[in-house]
Amino acid sequence: MLYGVDTIHGATYVQGATLFGQPISAAASFNPELVYRMGAVAAKDTLSAGIPWIFSPVLGIAVQPKWSRVYETFGEDPLVSSVMGAALIKGLQSSGKVVACMKHFIGYSNVREGLDRADNVITDWDLVNYYAPSFLAAVRAGVRTAMESYVSVNGVPVIASKKLLVDLLRHDMNFSGLLVSDYSEVDRMYSEHHLVPSVADAVRVTLQETSLDMNMSPDLQDFGDTIESLVANGLITESRLDESVRRILETKRDLGLLDSGYYDEFGHDGMDADEDVGSLADQEDALKMAQESVILLENRNGTLPIDLKKTTSVFVTGPVSDNKGFQCGGWSVFWQGSIDSTLFPNGATFKEAVQSKAAGHAQVDHLEVVDIDGKVNPQDFQRGIQLAAKSDYTLVVLGERNYAEKTGDLLGSMALPAGQLWYLEELSRLNSTKVIIVLVSGRPRLLEGAHDHADAVILSMLPCEQGGQALADVIFGDVNPSARLPITYPSRGTQLLPYFHRVNTRCQPYDECPVQWEFGHGLSYSKFEYSALWLNTTQVHATSGALEVGVTVTNRGTRPGKEVVLLFVAQKFRRASVPETKLLKAFKKLETLAPGASQDVTFVLTPEHWSYYEPHIIGSGFQRRAEPGEFVVSLLPSSTDSSTPPAPRALDDAERSSQTKTRGAPGGMASEVASAAMAAPSVSFYVVP
């Protein structure tokens, strides 16, 4: 028997297992090495329960920030999802005893209005250039199994799509592993999608039109009988069944399931008495992930970090201030998560971590005042205002109720519950305390201006058990924040666009679309200076050239810190499709730089970085095309400033002549941006036929 389970951010259903932050938090770290460790630990702990098949990673591109499964993804960027997904797969499969399952193939994350399982429309261009790369990277990373998607794409349910499950997945991506349906999708072809008039027809269409190998549904008891009847009537060939049987048996063979006595090692109750589950070493890995996932969004007047030597009182408040269940979100112990800390034996709540940190230095008071749904306790409110007024710092921890899948649909506003925002505004009216907002949520929830008078804003997404400690470490300066937003944080619920939207997109006449914080935004306690941006050449051949891009990163601050270097490429003009504003093409997280230390960073770009996939040849293999023309390379540094860095742009002729110079360099003439520190340094290069 082959058992499989959803292991989204650790062995969710194994008692005492190490739970990491959700994938969206992992993405914020921009550290694939930590994601690899997350996969290795999750696989080890899941296997201890005798389960060798893990339904992870979720590789959808989260372009709908209202969607209830955003936190299961690695964010909105195709490259980040590709790199992090591949790292997680390699970690999950590193022992050779577990197989990962990439999901949900394909297009699930673009559901209309963010409503889970809703229909969606995706052009072939978007499909192959934005949604397919993360799955292609997973196949190249050696993922052994795949799961199709609940939704229909352009009116055709994925479960019935030859174009997607044969032409794209099997032929173009060369995926040869086991393909399983999402829960009950074969039956839903009849009962929900209304594509066929009977369940028997659904089974027939699935086997005739797609390459599905396994049906995930305990309710469809007559699945086998239906297949037998279809074969007997000549509607399905035995050779088609042989293909799927072979892939299933190969998976079982490689896992050792065909060997006698496989489950004997797990004991009479199916559990392996593995004392390594939830080990201190694993907990340390989860803490590192949480620490590198804390995003500092605003830090007005250098409010953070808090110096305990100069602090006498701290007030901790808000609905997520003392609740590990809300720190973890859905898919944590239970499918829908847990409402309190009872079932989470590891880590600490935020309140507990702050109390431990401040012990012997400052008085820490705590009162939630408002619950997770925004209901304010009138008596607690008066007391809360009094406690805040007398405290040096007020730490307000806000968030959303746990959910998974359809239960998380936002049918109304994207804003946090009104009571939470009202309470925050009342606290911000006080002049005697510095208000620090800590956001804990699985997707961007609008603040509607309630943060305008706060002194600092922190976002941790869903850091789980170790989140309380990690947040305290950042707030009190033991850890210098290094995370970046893996998804655009909108300012309005009516303007929801990924950062790589087309350049001609306008939300109002002649106006661009404002956001609260852009993709890649994240502040540091250090000041990182980018200087000497250079290219080894300004002209490359469209199909065979290579381009080196270099920059020097210097820590001009007083604290050691890590920096994420993000490299974007924007095409000025493109005939095949209106170009994107920019696309992330490379990133690197630097190890800790001491104050005054510098590091030279070099990226090598190839035709893959300035070309696109031809959209009209699904089923003919992935083919790239590069159009000649001007491209802009830009870097997005972190900053100690609260303002959002300007969007990358090309240097005009005057700027280019005043700020660049040529020099001898390996590979030919080089262009160097001589400006010592630019908020968003950029320079152009040209692709020639």
Image (cartoon, rainbow, N blue to C red):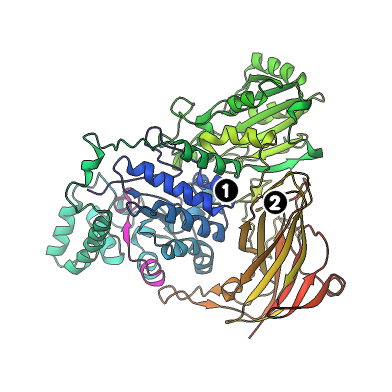
Is residue 50 visible to the viewer in this orientation of the structure? Answer: yes
Residue 169 belongs to the span the image colors magenta:
yes
Tell me which label, 1 or 2, sits earlier in the chain.
1
Query: In terms of depth relative to the viewer, which is nearer, 141 or 499?
Result: 141
Residue under label 2: 593
- Choose top left, top right, bottom left or bottom right for residue 442: top right
Residue range in magenta is 168-188
Determine crowd level at label 2: few under 14, some 14-19, many 20+ residues with C-alpha closer than 10 A: many
- Quarter holding the C terminus is bottom right
Residue 673, percent across and down?
79, 68
Inspect the image, locate mark 1, and give the three-letter code of the amino acid beneath it: Pro
Q: Tag 2, which secondary structure?
A: loop
Query: Which residue extends farthest left?
Result: 232
Cβ atoms under marks 1 and 2 closer than 8 Å: no
Residue 554, percent across and down?
75, 56
Residue under label 1: 65
- Choose top left, top right, bottom left or bottom right for residue 666: bottom right
- Choose top left, top right, bottom left or bottom right for residue 361: top right
Inspect the image, locate mark 2, and give the three-letter code of the amino acid beneath it: Leu
